């Protein structure tokens, strides 16, 4: 049985979805039941072209991996799985803004109506979808992200005199401004992955942060950033999941993250948790990790244990179960269709 994985058009600094589902696709191919293919839509902005292209390349099972929710309109409803990573578009705009209603209808409500099954990566995203769109909770299945197996544990002696802190992501929710204020006066080197706008650069310079900025990284280069850092900062104000949490744990780096959902639940006891809106609390958490060696070791050990909970094998099996349920529905529909047609012909329906 063939599964088509539909991906957004490749873009610089946006590859987390691709890394996740390329690994899932590889594992699915190892199962005897399925074979898969990757379908990348042709355009970043041309929605109509993407919908038309998706319709031409669908398979027995179609899985939209995220972001391009709207391509479900070109696919058969009963064959389609739609993964939604977050509700950021519905939290970014006011209800008085026309963009809110456009995103709500075209990126969420309509695509969800035209999908057999919706998967989300956290209970938090499920709660948000139900609240913000009115979709029925029983149509949504929670399938979390996983440790990318290419992120291998790599021990490192912690540099207590001038630690290298890794920050993944630069969008507004990644909280660069508060992080910069929190780090003011601390001796450290901040490595930031992602494009920095003028406002972010200004706040970093105002607070005299010693930083380096990296964009357009390959997977190997991103992985190396984790290996070479001493700790990871991920004090985001909004996430659907928070993949850097798993990546930091996989490589074996102490992590400071936000004490809000879903980071709070996902990190569990493997991170120092702080209030992302309070710069003093962010500073407190980072300082504790730098100064307390026993605490760092505890975080790293707890992170290692999380590998069993978020293994790629576990997550792949959850997706395979969903595909199997849809395939069974399709088989039942195929068997019943001739009977319904005959009943209709003889006036029994």
Image: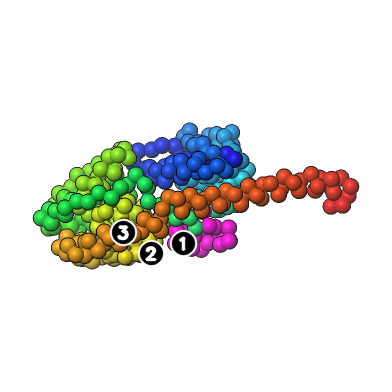
Could you tell me what secondary structure mostly forms the magenta stretch? helix
Q: Which residues are magenta?
A: 119-141
Q: Residue at x 46, y 52 (%)?
A: 315
Q: Residue at x 48, y 45 (%)?
A: 65
- The tag earlier along the polypeptide, 2 or 1, is 1
Q: Horizontal placement of 241 versus 316: left or right? A: left
Q: Give residue 258's quadrant in the image.
A: bottom left
**Number of numbered discs overlaid on the protein picture:** 3
Label 1 crowd bin: few (<14), some (14–19), many (20+), radius 10 Å: some
Q: Residue at x 43, y 50 (%)?
A: 312
| Number of the label disc, if any, that sits on residue 303 | 3
Q: Name the residue that disc number 1 marks.
A: 123
Q: Looking at the picture, does residue 78 appear above or below residue 10? A: below
Q: Position of residue 7 (x, y in %)?
A: 47, 40
- The tag earlier along the polypeptide, 1 or 3, is 1
- The tag earlier along the polypeptide, 3 or 2, is 2
Q: Position of residue 310 (x, y in %)?
A: 40, 55
Q: Quadrant of the N terminus?
A: top right
Q: Horizontal placement of 8 versus 207: left or right? A: right
Separation of residues labelled 1 and 3 (CA atoms): 20 Å
The kind of secondary structure element at disc 2 is helix
């Amino acid at each position: 049985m063939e599964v088509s994985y539909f991906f957004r058009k490749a873009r610089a600094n946006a590859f987390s979805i691709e890394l996740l589902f390329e690994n899932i696709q590889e594992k699915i191919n190892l199962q005897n039941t399925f074979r898969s293919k990757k379908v990348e839509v042709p355009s970043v902005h041309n929605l109509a072209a993407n919908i038309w292209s998706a319709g031409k390349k669908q398979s027995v099972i179609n899985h939209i991996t995220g972001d391009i929710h709207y391509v479900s309109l070109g696919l058969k409803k009963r064959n389609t799985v739609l993964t939604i990573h977050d509700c950021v578009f519905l939290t970014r705009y006011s209800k008085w803004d026309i963009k809110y209603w456009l995103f709500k209808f075209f990126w969420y409500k309509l695509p969800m109506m035209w999908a057999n099954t919706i998967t989300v990566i956290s209970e938090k995203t499920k709660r948000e979808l139900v609240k913000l769109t009115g979709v029925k909770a029983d149509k949504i299945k929670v399938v979390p992200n996983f440790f990318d197996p290419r992120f291998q544990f790599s021990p490192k002696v912690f540099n207590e005199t001038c630690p290298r802190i890794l920050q993944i992501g630069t969008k507004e929710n990644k909280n660069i401004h508060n992080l910069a204020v929190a780090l003011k006066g601390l001796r450290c080197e901040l490595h930031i992955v992602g494009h920095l706008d003028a406002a972010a650069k200004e706040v970093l310079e105002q607070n005299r942060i010693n930083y380096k900025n990296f964009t357009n990284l390959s997977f190997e280069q991103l992985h190396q950033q984790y290996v070479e850092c001493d700790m990871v900062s991920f004090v985001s104000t909004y996430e659907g999941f928070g993949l850097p949490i798993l990546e930091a744990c996989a490589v074996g780096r102490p992590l400071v993250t936000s004490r809000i959902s879903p980071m709070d639940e996902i990190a569990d006891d493997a991170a120092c948790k702080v209030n992302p809106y309070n710069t003093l609390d962010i500073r407190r958490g980072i300082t504790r990790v730098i100064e307390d060696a026993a605490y760092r070791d505890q975080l790293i050990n707890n992170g290692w244990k999380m590998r069993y909970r978020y293994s790629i094998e576990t997550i792949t099996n959850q997706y395979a179960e969903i595909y199997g349920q849809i395939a069974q529905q399709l088989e039942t529909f195929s068997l019943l269709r001739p009977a319904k047609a005959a009943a209709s012909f003889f006036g029994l329906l």
